[in-house]
Image (cartoon, helix red, strand yellow):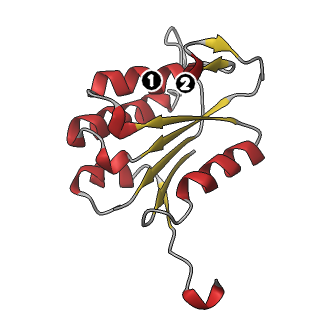
Amino acid sequence: RVILLCGPPGVGKTTLALIAARHAGYRPVEVNASDERSASALKDRVLNAMESTTLDLKSSGKSKGSGRPNCVILDEVDGADARSAITTLVEIIRAEIPPKKVGKRKPFLRRPIIFICNHKYAPALRPLLSYARVFDLESPKQSRL
């Protein structure tokens, strides 16, 4: 449910994430992690995207009416507000795993999250690596172009 796409700029990470989300029947919702000023603002954006199925966040909340569940795509996660943002994102991922006994607690909706970064070995990303399936994308070889 959590994917980390890594690779140099221009290799097609964002395009791959968008196509994969659409192909799997989700409505991709892009959030640029480095644009958010604080970890709490990033958390609000991500949670709003995960809880909604038809809200268009780019059009100031207008309903799109697609009816498809959202897939959150967090771009430039290695450029986010370092440790606090990554810690917040890991909390969201961990909170999403429903407890064995639901009881009075309302579990989070299960939505896929795709993280995109340039450098998977950035120190701030270390806590995220144990929760994500990591895919390394490489630039195409000159002979293939």
* Residue sitting nearer the eye, 40 or 91: 40
Q: Amino acid at mark 1?
A: Arg
Crowding at dot 2, Cα within 10 Å, few <14 / some 14-19 / many 20+, comes out as many
Residue 122, given in percent of the width and then of the height, sits at 26, 58
Secondary structure under tag 2 reads helix
Residue drawn at x 24%, y 38% as measured from the top left: 81
Answer left or right for 85 relative to 26: left
Q: Is residue 144 above or below residue 9?
A: below
Q: Quadrant of residue 53?
A: top right
Q: Is residue 94 above or below residue 59?
A: below
Q: Is residue 101 above or below residue 134?
A: above
Residue 5, given in percent of the width and then of the height, sits at 49, 58
Report the residue marked by disc 2: 49
Residue 90 visible in the displayed image: no
Report the residue marked by disc 1: 45
State which quarter of the image contains the N terminus: top right
